[in-house]
Amino acid sequence: MINKRLLQSAADSKKYIYYQVLCQWISLLAQIVLIGVIANIFNDLYADVLKEDTIIISFAIVAGCLVIRFVMDKLMTRMSYLASKDIKLNLRKQIFEKLFLLNRTNQKELKNAELVQLTVEGVDQLETYFGRYMPQFFYSLLAPLTLFIVLSTISFKAAIVLFICVPIIPMSIVMVQKFAKKLLSKYWGMYANLGDRFLDNIRGLTTLKIYESDKEQQEKMNEEAENFRKVTMKVLVMQLNSISIMDLVAFGGAAVGIVFSLIAFNNNEITIGETFMMIMLSAEFFIPLRLLGSFFHIAMNGNAASKKIFSFLDAPISDKRTNNVDDKIKTVEVKELVYSYDDKKDVLKGINVEFKDNGLYAFVGESGCGKSTLSTLLTGGYDEYKGNILLNGKEVNTIDFTSLHEQITKIEDYNYLFKGTVYSALLDGNPKASEDEMWQALDIVNLSEYLKTQDGLHTKLMEKGSNLSGGQAQRLALARALLHDSSVYIFDEATSNIDVESELDIVNVIHKLAKEKIVIFISHRLANVHDADIIYVMKDGAIVEQGTHQQLYSQSGLYKEMNDVQMSFEAYTGGETHA
Ligand SMILES: Nc1ncnc2c1ncn2[C@@H]1O[C@H](COP(=O)(O)OP(=O)(O)OP(=O)(O)O)[C@@H](O)[C@H]1O
């Protein structure tokens, strides 16, 4: 009933759980005193000896008890918040750090929707676990014991009956737990799958509409939603049934205690005041465990979510990444590089290239020949490969990601722009960049004139930069990359899907950049790479030709063939087509 791992990961929360139990316990003592005082008045009334002094003192004690209960109640709410606050923050932080370490490009542990559900809702469920369930768990052990000690001084027989009935509630909880565990893990699995399909369908809605496949997907989603409804109903039925059982035990137990006290009163074994106390406190015996039962179901949800969170956090990460690229990257050496996604087919088949100091190195080749795979490998995206990828002599899969990201910047055809302003987007590239530096970068990518007609650096950006044109968004992403000021830049199809003017601007920037940095440029459009220092022509995962444009063109090989086809195609379309 207690998740040790969860408790261990919330060392700081433990004290708040104990404080909360203490508050509840003090509140219970105040309640006992309050009922005791009223019971005393009943006794005096019954014996006709009630004095004014007793009434005044009793009133003062009752008021004091009520104030104590009020203060404890407030404190409990505060403690409950404090107990769950840190663990939620910590777990979310750990999940994000883990994601970063796993490197999002090849993490397979969780689907996107599942990840969102876990980090948002899953972690929220732990609020009940730490804020309500855990304190209630300890309190429900302490309360019956305290009441037993108090009530046994009045009627040992009735107190022992109540005390014996108490364990029936946790026993019923344990029985329910056995069944609930399986059901809840099924519930979470279905929830995650449904979320994943929903997210996928929303993202691809336009495509689904174009191909008129939306109805089919809707039917699949309906089917999954229906299955999810069924499992949710099962969970609710299970919860309601177990609550009914617990109610029966709790109120039945209290009734038994009351009957025993009335019998004792009838036999003149206890006074009327004591009978009143027994009746009033019988219910208190069971209420804490009954409440525990209610929190238990929500806590079980948190428990199930925490299992998934921990299995994600425990997913092994390569411990090889202990190296740093201490300085600017001066050499990139790729030797006999072989890579396969599935251990069956080699996508890269023995690549040998070397990039030094600065220069423009272009990769061209037909779709699927392995260009992007190579670029991902160069940025440390995949751990397992054969051969070597050496950055300043250090194997890329041994280099810490932070160090790697400081020195290598990758710009693709789509680069995420976060909601905010142009200023905040540029700060993502370099948090220390001054406004002057930002304007310089925007000048280079030819975006400053446009931004001056808007709100300058404070021009608002919608999510994914959707209020900019494709070309403007790409130029802004490039300005952000320039501010990052790393020693290696990889442009992977960074100019596809944008207007000709923006493409020209970006290609110009790439050429200028190559005078100071190592620039690797992957492009379908051969006209963009004519001026590269070396052009590598790839085919089926191998480099089949290499050299300058003139050298390759004069060889009359694959490069010339691709170039001629593209030139004639562009002449036909008026240069408007980007392959
Ligand atoms: N994540 C992946 N899992 C499995 N196979 C993959 C994956 N990514 C790429 N491939 C396969 O690896 C091969 C090379 O793909 P890659 O994306 O590197 O080619 P490319 O030259 O960049 O193509 P394009 O110019 O179309 O982007 C292809 O056969 C592709 O199907």
Image (tube, rainbow, N blue to C red):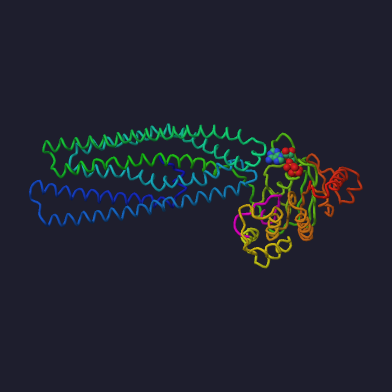
184 drawn magenta: no
Quadrant hosting residue 568: top right
Position of 579 with respect to 219 (left or right) is: right
**Magenta region includes residue 414:** yes
**Which residue in the rendered view is the most extreme toward the left?**
48
Residue in front for this viewpoint, 134 or 156: 134
Residue at the image point whose x is 59% and y is 47% from the top: 99
322 or 2: nearer the eye? Answer: 2
Q: Which residues are magenta?
A: 404-421
> Is residue 174 among what the camera can see?
yes
The x and y percentages for residue 454 are 65, 63
Question: In this orientation, does residue 441 appear?
Answer: no
* Quarter-of-image position of residue 162: top left
Q: Say left or right for 253 vs 331.
A: left
Report whether 525 appears left or right of 141. right
Q: Position of residue 467 (x, y in %)?
A: 64, 55
Residue drawn at 69 percent across, 36 percent down: 342
Q: Identify whether 228 is placed above or below 75.
A: above
